[in-house]
Amino acid sequence: MSTVTPSMKRNQRHQVRLTIEVVLLLIVLAAMALSTKVVKIGSGADTQTKEFEPAAYGEAQFPKTLAAIEKRAVAADVLAAAIAKDQDAAGKQYGIAGGGIGPEMSVKFTGVAGKEDSGVDEVKVPGLPDSLVIRVQTGPAIIGTDLRDATGDINFGQFTNQIDYQNAGYAINAAMKKDVLSKIDTAKLTGKTISVVGVFQLVNPNGWLITPVKLDVQ
C-alpha cells in the first residue's frame, strides 16, 4: 500500500500550477505573433522610420501637377466670359474644389507683361475686358497653395500632420521655381510678350493671381 505524503501533494500542486502557467504563456505568445505585422524598413508601410522629405516630394510631384494643369487649362477669354456670365457655374464647370474659399481654375493666355511689383507682374491680355486684372507670380517668393490644390489629387489625409501638408505646397512651388522661373530673367519681363499656363483661385472675378507652371518669353 502506497502512502502519499504532504510533500508529495505539494509537489503535485506545484507541477499543475507550473503547467498552467506555461500554457498561458504559450497562449499569450501566440496571440502576440498573430497581431504582429512585419514591416520592411524603407517600405511604404514603414511610417515609424520614414520622414516626409519636402524637396524630394516637390520634385516628384511638380511634373504631375504641370501635366494636370496644362490638360485642364482653359483659354483666358473663354474662362472670363464664363465667369462673367455665372461665376458659380464657371467654377463647377472648369474648376477644382480646393481647400480654400474658391475653386482652383487652370488657365492659359498670351499677353504683354507690365510693371513688376513685389514679385508679381501684371499682364495685359488681348480680348479681355479692361476691368479684369491678370497678375502672374514670378518670384522670388511664390505664395499660396494653388499648385498643391489645383489637381484635386492631393489631400490632407495623405500626410502625417498639417505641417507636412503645408510643406508639400511650398515644395511644389519651389520645384516650379527651379524648373520654370529660374530659366527666365524675371526682372526684365516688362514690355515683353509672354505665354503662360497656370492656375488661380477664383475669389475675385475681376482679379486673377496666377501661379504659373509654364512661362515662355517671346
Image (spheres, rainbow, N blue to C red):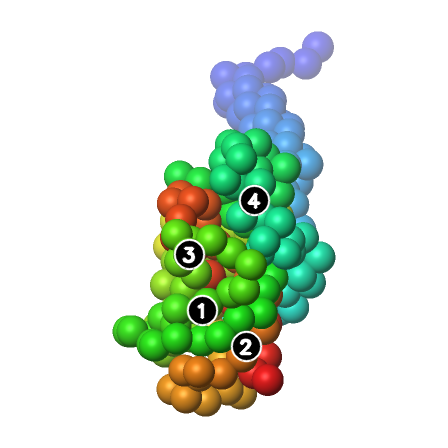
Question: Is disc 1 placed on a helix, strand or loop?
Answer: strand
**Tag 4: Cα neighbours inside 10 Å, few (<14), some, or many (≥20)?**
some
Dots 4, 3 in contact, CB < 8 A: no
Secondary structure state at the residue bearing disc 4? helix
The residue type indicated by label 4 comes to Ala
> Which sits in the foreground, 211 or 132?
132
Q: How many marks?
A: 4
* Residue 71 visible within the image: yes
- Disc 2 to disc 4, C-alpha distance: 22 Å
The answer to whether residue 21 is above or below residue 101 is: above
Real-space Cα separation, disc 4 to disc 1, in angstroms: 18 Å
Q: Return the x and y of residue 125 as percentages of the image width and height.
A: 51, 65
Report if residue 98 is visible in the image. Answer: no
Q: Which mark is residue 123?
A: 1
Residue at disc 2, secondary structure: strand
Question: In the rendered image, which residue does mark 4 sit on?
Answer: 81
The answer to whether residue 170 is left or right of residue 83 is left
Tell me which label, 4 or 1, sits earlier in the chain: 4
| Disc with the residue nearer the chain's start (1 vs 3) | 1
Q: Is residue 58 above or below residue 28?
A: below
Which residue in the structure is indicated by mark 2? 194
Distance in Å between CA atoms under marks 2 and 3: 18 Å
Query: From the viewer's perspective, is the residue at label 2 or at label 3 nearer?
Result: 3
* Mark 2 nearby-residue class (10 Å; few <14, some 14–19, many ≥20): some
Identity, as a three-letter code, of the amino acid under mark 1? Val
Which label's residue is closer to the chain start, 2 or 1?
Answer: 1
Looking at this view, is 13 or 133 the one in front? 133
Q: Amino acid at mark 2?
A: Ile
Q: Is residue 66 above or below residue 90?
A: below
The residue that label 3 is drawn on is 130
**Which callout, 4 or 3, points at the residue further toward the start of the chain?**
4
